[in-house]
Each structure stands twice: as C-alpha cells, then as structure tokens.
Image (spheres, rainbow, N blue to C red):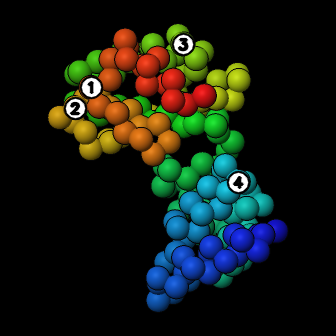
Amino acid sequence: MLTETERRELDDAVKHYPDKRGAAIDALLTIQRRRGWISDDSLLEIAQFLEITAEDLDSVATFYNLVFRKPVGRHVAFMCDSISCWIKGCDQVREQIKKLYDVDFGQTSSDGRLTLLPIACLGRCERAPAVMIDQDVYGDVTPETVEHIMEKYK
C-alpha cells in the first residue's frame, strides 16, 4: 500500500504532466528511492495510481536501466562498458572491484554493500573509464583508485 508520503510525492510528480501516465518514470524512481527497488506489489500500486496496466508500467521499468526490479545493495555501481571505457581499461577496473568485493556484473556483495551493473554509456568518454556509484560519477578510474573511491560508500 502506498504510504501517505509516497502518495503526496506521486501527486506532486503527476502535476508536471498533462496525463498521469507521463509520470511513469518519475513515479517508479520516487517509490524506488523510498523502498530500494520496485517489487511486483510496488509496480501494481504505482500502476493503479497512474491508471495504467501493470504490464505497461513493467515495460517502462524494464526498459529504463535505473529502475531496479529486484533487490540491490545499499550502493549501486554502474560500470560503463562503452568502447571508450574498454579501450581505457574498464575490464581491469571491474576485475579490481570483483577482487575487493567478490561481486561481478549483476551481483550484490554478500554484505549487501554493493551491486555492480553494466551501463552502455555514462557520457564521460573523455575521462574513461567511468563508474557511477549511486548518483556520483567518477572518471579516469583505475584499479588503484577503486578502493579509495569506495571508501565513501560503506
């Protein structure tokens, strides 16, 4: 059941659109900020609020890679796997993350601290390889700088 606070936030989000359905991504992200991810129950609640089918909303949720349809860690790291990042060594950065946190793409560390996901592009080609942790984007990441960067995310 949507909480009163969630309902207020969704009401605010839909005000910016001529049709409630236009707020689908905003609504998904609003509930995800509160609950950590979008469960099937949450998806149904949001769909009912937006007056669309759960199937239509799920197609939005599964297309948009910043909406999590299964539980994630306290922090989510998106590793850019574009050609620029590959050329500049993102595979070595991923290996260092894997070594330090025992996690690979699509996995969450056993302590629940970190989920590692690939992303097609972070728009930082000039500072490749790039990683986004939560909402913070880092460029020129090297295997040697990963541990220092991760200090912030305990």
SS type, badge 1:
loop
Q: Is residue 95 left or right of residue 85?
A: right
Q: Nearer the viewer, residue 96 or 64?
A: 96
The answer to whether residue 21 of the structure is visible from this angle is: no
* Above/below status of 74 relative to 140: below
Distance between the Cα atoms at labels 4 and 3?
27 Å
Q: Is residue 151 left or right of residue 7?
A: left
Work out whether mark 4 precedes mark 3 in sequence or the reverse, and give the earlier one: 4
- Residue placed furthest toward the front: 152
Distance between the Cα atoms at labels 4 and 1?
32 Å
- Residue placed furthest toward the bottom: 18
- Residue placed furthest toward the right: 1
Where does residue 14 sit, x and y in percent of width and height? 55, 81
To which residue does mark 1 refer? 140
To which residue does mark 4 refer? 35
Q: Residue at x 50, y 42 (%)?
A: 134
Q: Nearer the viewer, residue 39 or 34?
A: 34
Amino acid marked by disc 3 = Leu
Q: Nearer the viewer, residue 80 or 126?
A: 126
SS type, badge 2:
helix
Distance between the Cα atoms at labels 2 and 4?
33 Å
The numbered mark at residue 100 is: 3
Distance between the Cα atoms at labels 1 and 2?
5 Å
To which residue does mark 2 refer? 127
Give the quadrant of the C terminus: top right
Where does residue 80 sit, x and y in percent of width and height? 36, 34
Amino acid marked by disc 4 = Arg
Amino acid marked by disc 1 = Asp
| Tag 1–tag 2 contact (CB < 8 Å) | yes
* Disc 3 residue crowd, few under 14, some 14–19, many 20+, Cα 10 Å: few
